[in-house]
């Protein structure tokens, strides 16, 4: 079985260790994989060829993220709105998903990836559900990259689902309305075991969130590239990470506050480092 660390080239290892050394890598990256159809069109091919090539990007990005030691990657693989596409294209996408799960399961597992899925999963074809749940079960105790597939997913749908469950809990007397907080709302979402995305990457130049992780991405840094998803490989990921590392995340504060906090933090670190325990 392929060991992703062993197969890595020296040059790629060097780039990754530079990225790690620069510090502040995102704990969670969410991808809106857009532009498969347009990529295919530009090549004079059928749309499905774009989805097929898109899977090669999925393979490379998952592998690179795992080699880098990133903890969470979430892929918007099929939105609830995508059910409205022509039936033939939906069938191809479901078939590709099924093939991906079958062909990658062993390799993902061998490389310590934990697979998860969010969305209205019972809307997926039974065969895909079975493969998905089997893979998730096999990999549930892995401790490396958590790879979450958003399938038949919609951000608003998940928020509505959470509100309905909260309302039921209020009716049952388990929750009182005045105790509802941002944290408790988050805990009702399907993403409750994931940190919020630090970085949201969208390919193909569109400037939209398209109903993806609406609540969770409140403070995500958004990176948009003109590359189509089938062209987005590890070098494009590295470029996005360098861009992210150069951003200042203020979470509503001023630049001055952020600079002061970082100075105070390094002072405490130096102080702790200088304390000798007798
Ligand atoms: C958007 O391109 C892409 C999708 C709707 C599907 C993404 C799916 C894959 C990359 C393959 C399956 C994924 C996994 C994880 C196995 P588009 O068709 O909307 O492109 P367009 O906007 O150019 O038409």
Image (cartoon, helix red, strand yellow):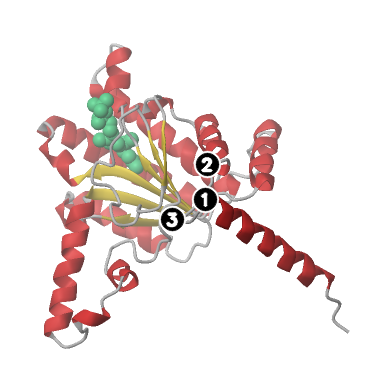
Front disc: 3 or 2: 3
Q: Secondary structure at mark 3?
A: loop
- Check mark 3 vs ligand 1: CB closer than 8 Å? yes or no: no
Q: Residue 8's image quarter? A: top right
- Residue in front for this viewpoint, 23 or 40: 23
Q: Secondary structure at mark 2?
A: helix
**In the rendered image, which quarter contains the C terminus?**
bottom right
How far apart are the two marked residues, 2 and 1, measured between alpha carbons?
8 Å
- Residue in front for this viewpoint, 160 or 75: 160
Front disc: 3 or 1: 3
Front disc: 2 or 1: 2
Q: Residues within 10 Å of mark 3 (few under 14, many from 20)?
A: few
Q: Which residue is mark 2?
A: 244
- Residue in front for this viewpoint, 270 or 278: 270
Q: Residue 134's image quarter? A: bottom left
Query: What residue is rendered at 29% in x and 62% in y?
Result: 190
Q: Which residue is mark 1?
A: 26
Q: Is residue 92 left or right of residue 182?
A: left
Give the mark, 2 or 1, whose residue is nearer the N terminus.
1
How far apart are the two marked residues, 3 and 2, measured between alpha carbons?
17 Å
Residue lying farthest to the top in this orientation: 44
* Label at residue 153: none
x, y percent for residue 161: 17, 64
Q: Residues within 10 Å of mark 1 (few under 14, many from 20)?
A: some
| Ligand 1: quadrant of the figure | top left
Q: Which residue is mark 3?
A: 252
> Is 178 placed above or below 45 here?
below
């Amino acid at each position: 079985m392929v060991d992703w660390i062993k197969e890595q080239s020296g040059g790629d290892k060097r780039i990754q260790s530079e990225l790690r050394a620069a510090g502040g890598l995102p704990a969670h990256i969410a991808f809106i994989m857009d532009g498969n159809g347009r990529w295919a069109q530009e090549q004079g091919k059928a749309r499905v060829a774009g989805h097929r090539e898109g899977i090669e990007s999925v393979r490379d990005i998952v592998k690179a993220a795992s080699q880098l030691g990133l903890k969470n990657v979430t892929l918007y693989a099929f939105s609830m709105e995508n059910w409205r596409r022509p039936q033939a294209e939906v069938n191809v996408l479901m078939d590709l998903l099924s093939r991906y799960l079958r062909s990658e399961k062993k390799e993902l597992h061998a490389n310590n990836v934990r697979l998860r899925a969010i969305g209205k999963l019972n809307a997926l074809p039974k065969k895909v559900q079975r493969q998905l749940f089997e893979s998730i079960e096999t990999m549930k105790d892995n401790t490396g990259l958590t790879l979450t597939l958003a399938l038949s997913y919609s951000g608003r749908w998940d928020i509505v689902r959470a509100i309905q469950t909260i309302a039921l809990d209020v009716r049952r007397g388990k929750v009182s309305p005045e105790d509802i907080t941002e944290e408790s709302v988050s805990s009702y979402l399907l993403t409750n075991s994931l940190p919020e995305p630090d970085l949201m990457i969208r390919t193909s130049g569109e400037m939209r969130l398209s109903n993806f992780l609406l609540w969770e991405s409140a403070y995500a840094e958004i990176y948009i590239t003109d590359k189509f998803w089938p062209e987005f490989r590890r070098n494009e990921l590295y470029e996005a990470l360098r861009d992210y590392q150069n951003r200042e995340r203020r979470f509503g504060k001023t630049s001055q506050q952020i600079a002061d906090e970082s100075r105070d933090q390094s002072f405490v670190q130096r102080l702790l480092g200088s304390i000798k325990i007798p």
